[in-house]
Image: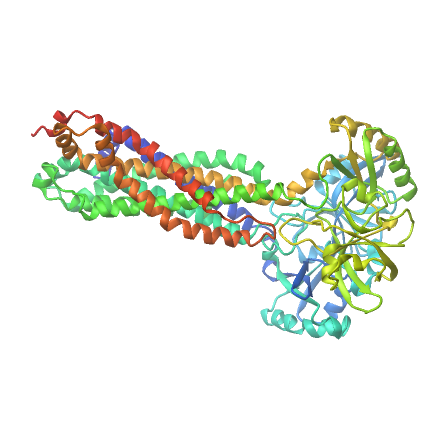
Amino acid sequence: MLKNYFLIAWRNLMKRKVYAGINILGLGLGITCSLVVFALTWHLNSFDQFHTKADHIYRVVTDTFEGSREYHTPGVPVVLKEAFVNDFKGIEESVLISGSHNGLITVLAGGGEKYFQESQIGFTTGDFFRVFDREILKGKSDGILHQPNQAVISKAYAEKYFGTADPIGQTIQFQKEDVYVVEAVMADFPDNTDFPFDIFLSYENLREGRERGAWFSIYSDDQFYVVINNPEDVREIEAGIPAFVDKHIGEDFREKRAHKLQPLSDLHFNEKYTNYSFQVISRSIITALYVVALFLLVTASINFVNLSTALSSQRSKEVGLRKVFGGHKGNIISQFLSETGLLTFMAILLSLIATQISLRYLNDFLEVKTNFGIFFSFEGIFLILMMWTTITFMAGFYPSFSISKLNPINAIKSQFQTKKSTSFVLRKGLVLVQFVITQFFIIGTLVLAYQINHLRSADLGFQQDAVASFVIPERNMEKSNLLAERLRNLTSIDHVSLSSFEPSSSSVSSTNVIMTESGEEYTIQIKSADEHYVDTYGLEIKFGEDLIKSDTVTRFLATESFAKKAGFENPEDLLGVYVNIGGTEAPISGVVRDFYTMSLKAEPEPTFILTNPRLYRTVGLKITQSNANMVMEDVEKIFSELYPEFNFEYSFLDEKIAKFYESETKLTSLFTLFSVIAVIVGCIGLYGLVSFLTLLKVKEIGVRKVLGANTGQILLLVSKEYLLLVCVAFILATPLAIYVMNKWLEGFAYRIQISWGLVAMAFLATLLMALLTAGYKSIQAAWANPVHSLKSE
């Protein structure tokens, strides 16, 4: 019996290849999006969940408060580790990691030297391997990294540095300074980790410099992790942190600083704090992807229902004859469900192929490594089976149930559905839902695109065009000054500056400034820079004078926002005011127009610029010629003469700033893609509705044509139903879309306002889409010969 069902189902599909193709395409698009989202979110949620103690690992993070402003960092004062372990019970293991160090690795082997420019080097202790699962493949597993000048490298780097030779006991040098002995080789890090380290060096070599600032020096790369097995201990530690701050930092900081425990599972999703992979994706985006996938799957299933019920009218005679010859209701339901199951199965097969292809491009685009193999796991197979059975039942049950109830006589005469029937009302409701979703997607996509363009065209308070920068590889001021002087001799370069960071950078430094006279203290950002910084980056000094050439701090530049923060209504009144930063007291000599030190998601931060050659690590170049690549070739020659062991890598400032909004840009592209798919699926649903409408009106259209109705009147008759649906969908979708997108825009200090012009553009796009989709069927109905529609059997 089952074989006959599927055999008949196959024959019926072959008779209606166009409708079957439309059904498979629409359903396949919805399923593909769902599978892609499932694979992507599965990969993202798997980050660092392979560790044995994953559920018990926490990172201690730091929050600081100043009035209404909050500052968040994953870093802690390095002296916190020992005090934290001593003051709180329940901590099974702990480790401090100073990560994200870049530099020159010199391999001292074979009587020669080989140089490698490396990134993501971590300084830590052997406790790392007791907290996290990173297998030691060779060498000793106990006592490593507890003594100075020890190193652990990954298997890939052992082969890279030493080939087939035994790496244990070999030596490497970091930044031409300390020499480290390789004590062990560890497994390569997996793709789904936020600890992508290939080299670990002894933290003891870094300790003295890091602890110099005690409790008031915090680097975001100095991160502290603990293992706490008992949930009750977690609650006690969090409750005891205020007293911990009072004890070690002082009661004055009770309202200004707080530490809290962040679960390991939150590292990849919390945008307040970064991680060592520098990849953070908001859980709200994950939720949005789930919702998008669900919407697309729902709209695809709606299409299936609409097209199936529309086709059922063409098979009414078949159903009537089956009933006349003794066919039971259950047989008819089984027959139609088998056809639905076959269509769904074909759609899923098509979707799996499309998903595999999509993931290849999506991985490159999102810079992730989502594995298609997840669909061969128990969870993946279970998902596909559940999707197949659910869609088959949900999409096939109503059409099969409704047609199985037909009166045989009416079915044979094709007299069973009218515009007032329940099935027709339901079909219109389903198409309405599709258009609401489509309208929502279109408005959302337009808002995303306009906001990204708004950010890119914003005035950041400095020049970003034709400005390049690169990192100084060594902390040698004489060599750095020589490099800057030689670059200034190039006619193609207008200005050269040495500084800690560019005006806007992903790396920032924060500290406190004390007003000498009043003793008031404020949190600020600082930029260490020479006297050419303002000219190189096109900053604007509103009042006062620029920095002067000096080896020490003799004066400060402050931004207008600091004047406002410190209570100066007139920024010019800041000139000559003495302040103390890090124990150095000097006057404010100039007030700079506000500029954005980070992305436009936040207001400009109060910032000070000062001369501190010890912290210079960036060279900024203002290029005068249009051919920037040729200019940078000249720069590379000078760089290579002074730093022959290092690779020359540079970037343009506008490109670095664009990376601030990389996630938003990618989100916009994904949303646009999903919107296009939603539009296609919606068009398929509309095509099904119009097909059904014309089928119901075929005799009415014939009569009207016989009585003299022209093509325009017939088109209006057929079109008014779905045009009304488009208008109603617009009224329902617009408030929801505006609310959701305004919530998203709240994350930006510099944002657009959603205008009615933008909403009208989305409505016109939907209307045009509807007209183009349904136009063919409408015109076909208008041009049909009334003789064929009015003939009687």
Residue nearer the viewer, 274 or 732? 732
Relative to 225, say whether 370 is above or below.
Answer: above
Kindly identify the residue that appears in the image at 40 percent across and 40 percent down: 678
Q: For residue 9, which quarter of the picture? A: top left
Q: Where residue 700 sits: x, y (%)?
A: 15, 35
Q: Where residue 264 sits: x, y (%)?
A: 61, 57
Kindly identify the residue that appears in the image at 67 percent across and 59 percent down: 72
Q: Is residue 705 visible?
A: yes
Left/right of residue 321 with respect to residue 523 in the rendered view:
left
Q: For residue 463, which quarter of the picture? A: top right
Q: Quadrant of the C terminus?
A: top left
Q: For residue 650, which quarter of the picture? A: top right
Colour setup of the view: rainbow
Q: Where residue 538 sits: x, y (%)?
A: 76, 42
Q: Where residue 297 sits: x, y (%)?
A: 38, 44
Q: Is residue 331 visible?
A: no
Left/right of residue 789 with respect to residue 116 in the rendered view:
left
Residue nearer the viewer, 745 or 219? 745
Kindly identify the residue that appears in the image at 13 percent across and 42 percent down: 416
Left/right of residue 290 with respect to residue 503 in the rendered view:
left
Relative to 728, say whether 573 is above or below.
Answer: below
Q: Quadrant of the N terminus?
A: top left
Residue nearer the viewer, 747 or 557? 557
How many marks the image carries: the answer is 0
